[in-house]
Image: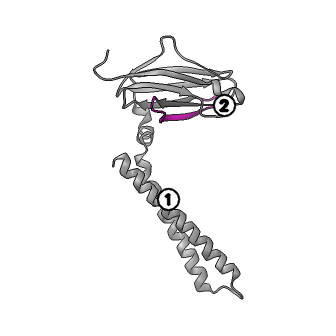
Amino acid sequence: MNVLSLALYLRIFYAALVLIVVSLMVFYVRGLTTKGETSGRLKAVFYGWLGFLVAVAILFHLLTAWQIPWVRWEIKRAEIVPNREFALNAKQHRFTLPAGGLKVRQGEVVKFKVTSSDLTYGFGVFHESGAMEFQMQVLPGHSNEIIWIFKDPGKYSIRSTEYAGPETEQMYLKDSITVLSGEEK
């Protein structure tokens, strides 16, 4: 399934979900404002409708979760051997990168290990177009790792995606990752 059709399905689903939630609210308010006791039949219809909606939401989640790229990788994470591994540190509102920068080839499996010794930060990688490739939360004292495969060559920037105080804005490293196409050396 391509990204465009998935996005269209998601928009249709969420628009329908909003309409369904509104219908539930109307149904519930109507039951509250009627005089006298609510019939058992009306309650059965309401709870039947609610159960149906929960089942549809769970089914939709299970069907679309596989479209998220990292879900497939996480399932087989123990078997994945990265082509490159980068250790980065976040401390005092700054990212520290390895000497020589971060250079990878398109299609390589890359593991980022990011540590923090003081605060909770975010680690987000953004394409030069501004689109986010991925992000993760970096917690002090925890192993913070993510495996990624860059599909498009180009320059990528790193920025903190978690607010860690007013100095968070300086946690932006423009064009800090270079992804070379298969032909480049």
| SS at badge 2 | loop
- Three-letter code, disc 1: Tyr
Is 74 situated left or right of 91 in this image?
Answer: left
- Three-letter code, disc 2: Thr
The disc placed on residue 120 is 2
Give coordinates of residue 126: x percent, y percent: 49, 31
| Number of other residues with Cα within 10 Å of mark 2, as a class: few under 14, some 14 to 19, many 20 or more | many
Is 144 situated left or right of 183 in this image?
Answer: right
Name which quarter of the figure residue 120 lies in.
Answer: top right
Please check the rendered image and state whether residue 86 is part of the magenta-colored stretch, yes or no. no
Name which quarter of the figure residue 25 lies in.
Answer: bottom right
| Number of other residues with Cα within 10 Å of mark 1, as a class: few under 14, some 14 to 19, many 20 or more | few
Q: Residue at x 52, y 14 (%)?
A: 98
Please check the rendered image and state whether residue 137 is part of the magenta-colored stretch, yes or no. yes
Residue 26 versus residue 121 in the image, above or below: below
Q: Which residue is mark 1?
A: 14
Which residues are the magenta region?
128-142
| SS at badge 1 | helix
CA separation, marks 1 and 2? 32 Å
Q: Residue furthest front?
A: 129
